[in-house]
Every structure is written in structure tokens, then in C-alpha cells.
Amino acid sequence: MPRVVAEIAGNRPVSAVWVNELGGVTFRVGGPAPAEYVKTYPDAEAHLLDDEVVRLRWAHRYATVPEVLDNGPGWLRTAALPGRSAVDPRWAGRPETAARAIGAGLRRLHDALPVADCPFGPPSWVGERTPAPDLLVVCHGDACAPNTLMADDGSCAGHVDLGDLGVADRWADLAIATMSLDWNFPEGRWETVLLDAYGVRADPERIAFYRRRWNDEPTPPG
Ligand SMILES: Nc1ncnc2c1ncn2[C@@H]1O[C@H](COP(=O)(O)OP(=O)(O)OP(=O)(O)O)[C@@H](O)[C@H]1O
Ligand SMILES: [Mg+2]
């Protein structure tokens, strides 16, 4: 356990809850309530948490996202939102419920965050020369299933992991959210359920474009 996590915890219980692709580890501290989360990143990637701090502080005024309690080089401490990730084992056998929560949650997020006030440019992976936007919104930027939290009644309880939040076409989020359903719930196609809950018809060209960008594959000019 990193020293900063031990210091924050004091004599409260700590558990490691998530390891990301960069080797960063998120810890849950304390609880049942009030609990906190401490996200730690390797030195080389620590700047990504600085990006997340400013975005969380901005988005927290409009939407259900974690409150920043404290941060420092390579760590970010937030107040726990009451909910579990959409990929928590609780939802593993209920992909339709999860897909609906993710779609409805993204719609609520997009409706709540004001584009005109948003100081952040497009998510880092979106890049330039994109197709004409269907609708510019403030995108989550990493709209994979684990970053939607769900309440026990199956509704969306908020969003985490906002380090790449910024203004882009809503299909930047929808393409990734629907793609990640296939990673996390492989036994079916839940794309239509998610898009119905969001309130939109599939746009296969924009979906394909943003998935290629996400995967860092060449895209035809927009
Ligand atoms: N404030 C919070 N309230 C509730 N759950 C949280 C909170 N912060 C983090 N979590 C939980 O910890 C997990 C990891 O957090 P987060 O997604 O921010 O980390 P990450 O390392 O950036 O993830 P990724 O692998 O997507 O890059 C989340 O999926 C969520 O389950
Ligand atoms: Mg995450």
C-alpha cells in the first residue's frame, strides 16, 4: 500500500478495489459510510490525475461525480458516491439493467453539463478532423461500463474517472459505451438497449469512426 494511502486511512479499513492498465491502483478507505476512494498512479502518469482534479471540480457543480477531498502528486482522494460500478458482480447476470443504466446515465450527464461553460477541449484520444458533430456535448471521455456507478435499484448513481472529460460529439461517448458492453457482458448485444435508454438511434458511421479513434486506428478524413 502506498504510504499516502496508509496516512489517509489512519486506523480505518483499506481495500484495493481496482487496478488500471497503467498499473495505477484505487483504494477504498473507511466505510460503510462515509467512505472515501484514493486513486494512485505511477509517477510517469501522475499528470493524468491533475487533469482529473480540475475536471471533477468543474463537473461536480452540475452532475453526480465524486467530490475532490484532497490530492497530491500521483494521488487523488474523493468522497465515495453511493453506488457500485456497472461491472460489479452484482450486475454480471443482469446486463440489460446495466446497459439501461449506462445509457440513461450518459443522457443525464450530457444534458446536465453546459457546453458553453466548459473550459476543456475534446478528450485526448478524439483528435482533429472528426465528422460533423451530430450534437456537441460535454463528453465523459472514458465512457466504459466500469465508470458508470449504479444504485441497488438498477438506476445510474453517477460517474467516475473524469480525467478526459471535454467537449465533443455525443457519439464519442456513445461509441465507447456501447463497445465496452461487449467486453463486459459478452453473451449478448446490448447496444440497442443502451441507445434506447439514451434516447437515440444508432449512427453506425459515427460509431465506427470514434471506435477507430479510441483504438488508435487510421480514420478516413472527417
Ligand atoms: N468516489 C468514488 N465513489 C465510488 N466509487 C469510486 C469512486 N472513485 C473510484 N471508485 C471506484 O473505483 C474504480 C476505479 O476508479 P477510476 O475509474 O476513477 O480509476 P481508473 O484507474 O482511472 O480506471 P480505468 O481503469 O478506467 O482507467 C471505479 O470503477 C469505481 O468502481
Ligand atoms: Mg475507470
Image (cartoon, rainbow, N blue to C red):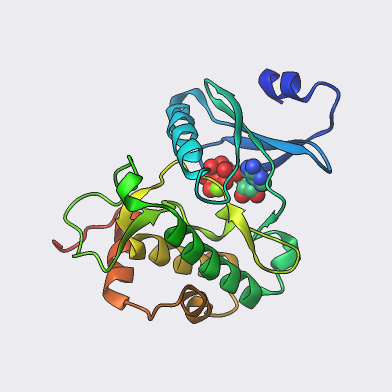
Q: Residue at x 76, y 38 (%)?
A: 35
Say whether residue 201 is left or right of residue 57: left
Is 119 situated left or right of 113 in this image?
left
Q: Is residue 178 left or right of residue 3?
A: left
Q: Position of residue 123 (x, y in %)?
A: 34, 47
Q: Residue at x 44, y 52 (%)?
A: 140
Residue farthest left in this picture: 221
Q: Position of residue 188 (x, y in %)?
A: 57, 80
In the rendered image, the quadrant that contains the C terminus is bottom left
Query: Total marks drawn?
Result: 0
| Location of residue 95 (image quadrant) | bottom right
Frontmost residue, 179 versus 170: 170
Q: Is residue 118 above or below residue 169?
A: above
Percent coordinates x, y for residue 137 in the rendering: 35, 58
Is residue 169 positioned above or below 45 on the image?
Answer: below
For the N terminus, give its image quadrant: top right
| In the foreground, 23 or 222 | 222
Out of 100 and 208, give the one closest to the viewer.
Answer: 100
Q: Quadrant of residue 209?
A: bottom left
**Residue 98, horizontal then vertical, whole percent:** 62, 69
Residue 20 shows in the view: no
Q: Report if residue 140 is visible in the image.
A: yes
Residue at image position (22%, 58%) is 218
- Residue 44 against residue 193 in the figure, above or below: above
- Residue displayed at 43% across by 60% down: 110
Q: Quadrant of residue 199?
A: bottom left
